[in-house]
Amino acid sequence: MRLAPILTLFLILQIAECIDQPLKEVPASDILDKIAKGQPVEYDHVIVKGDLVLDGLGLPIKYIGRTNYEIKVMGLPEYVTLVYSPLTITDSVIDGDVDLSNTLFNDTTDFRGSTFNGGDAKFAGCQFSSDADFSGSQFNEYTANFVGIQFNSDAMFYASRFTNTVTFFGSQFNGGAEFGSSQFNDEANFVYTQFNSYAEFSGSQFNGVTDFDGSQFNDSTYFDGSQFDSYTHFKFSQFNSYTYFDGSQFNSTADFTGSQFKDRFIGWDNIRDALTCDEATYLGLIKNFKEHGQFDDADDCYYTYRYRNMNTLPDFIGCISCGFGVRPMYSVYLSIIFIVLFGLVYWMGDAIYKLSAPAQEHALSKNKTWSLSIIWGLLVIDIKEIIIWFKYIPKRVLEYLRTLRPRSISKMLYDLCHKSFTTSVSLRDALYFSALVFFTLHPPHDWEYSEHWRYIILLEDVLGGIFITLFIVTLGNIIIRY
């Protein structure tokens, strides 16, 4: 029962001892000597002193079919040096230049957790026949050069850190490319790189310019959760399988001009604000979203494309009225704004009024003319109301009479001859009237409008018909998919 705690304590002490133990120094010449003899190279937790350069070891070479582009543009020779030794240098520090360029590694290569502190780390033109593991490694040199490299099995760079420029220009990954949780503190160059298996960049951080121009992703590609702090280029790249950018963050421009997407693209919301591209790329994305049932992304992509290319008055009207045919709620919002605006205008301009009770009855009559009996009846009603009002508020009445002027009296007489038997409307009534007109409904029979307002009311009626039609058409476009 007490053995387990003792073993646990023992393991903790052993680990602490290993951590505190200083790194053992190993001359680089020892490693080169083993490589020359074809012996396995296996070192862990050491410091390699000196330069790891294969030139002059007399290793066999093999001529390979380099293309003219590889020879003239990338500067690669037509041969590679053959190394048959498995190479393992883990959790170590390499204090010196590393130049393993143009080498064919026929066995495994393992630099997990190692730090390159010398000058440039050169692996240009290398070919790895088996797994190459650089997980957790750190490149502190001026440049980490992997130009034209070919990985024929899995390439592991998980959680690696590149302090300065790193270039994989023209490289080829025939196995999985694992760069998840890596950190690129300077320029990261993957121009014309070909990924023939999955490409994993999830959770990586790109602090400098990131360039994937002309790259080809032939299997699933993962950039989910990655962060791009500078310019990012994917111009003329091909994404031939699932592509994930969900949860990624672009703090600068992401240029996808000329890119093609052959399969599902996840993460439109994450690249939208930073995206810059040509018309063909936008239309290709829209088509891709529709083909894979991502209709919300297709609508948003189309809206973004039209909005960023908006330069005419019809474009502006199409944007605010219906969101270019993919935002039906824009019609609703603008309709509400028009109803409120017209209602305020009607209310402030006394454009509408209600007929009083006796006048309402008369408005329903066949001839609809003011007869003497109606006028007399209304006068009697008003006189009765005036008597009651005069009885209770005599002082206010006298003050009102003293304020009367000939102009006021003439206006009262004019109103008497022109439907003066009305009541004013509240703002709520004006908004209600505006809504009825906008939706082409008839207002109540006891409501009337002034003649000089008829064209304004007609305008609102026409606008209402237009926006109702726009809403129905846009909603139908959203609901009915093809």
Image (cartoon, rainbow, N blue to C red):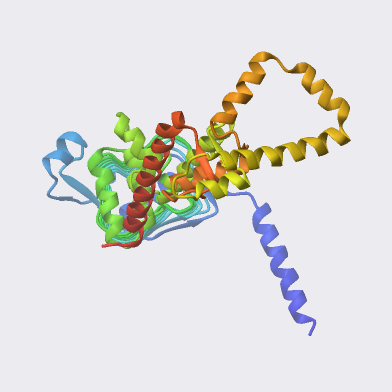
In the rendered image, which quarter contains the C terminus? bottom left
Furthest-front residue in this view: 373
Residue 367 falls in image quadrant: top left
Residue 450 versus residue 125 in the image, above or below: above
- Residue at 42% in and 39% down: 460
Left or right relative to 213: residue 142: right
Can residue 162 be seen by looking at this rendering? no
Q: Position of residue 392 (x, y in %)?
A: 88, 36
Residue 186 falls in image quadrant: top left
Q: Position of residue 162 (x, y in %)?
A: 46, 41
Q: Nearer the viewer, residue 22 or 237?
A: 237
Residue 266 falls in image quadrant: bottom left
In the rendered image, which quarter contains the N terminus? bottom right
- Residue at 80% in and 81% down: 2
Q: Nearer the viewer, residue 190 or 310?
A: 310
- Residue at 36% in and 54% down: 472
Q: Position of residue 83 (x, y in %)?
A: 28, 55
Q: Nearer the viewer, residue 41 or 120?
A: 120
Furthest-top residue in this view: 406
Q: Position of residue 71 (x, y in %)?
A: 16, 38
Please count the marks in the image: 0
Can residue 77 be seen by looking at this rendering? yes
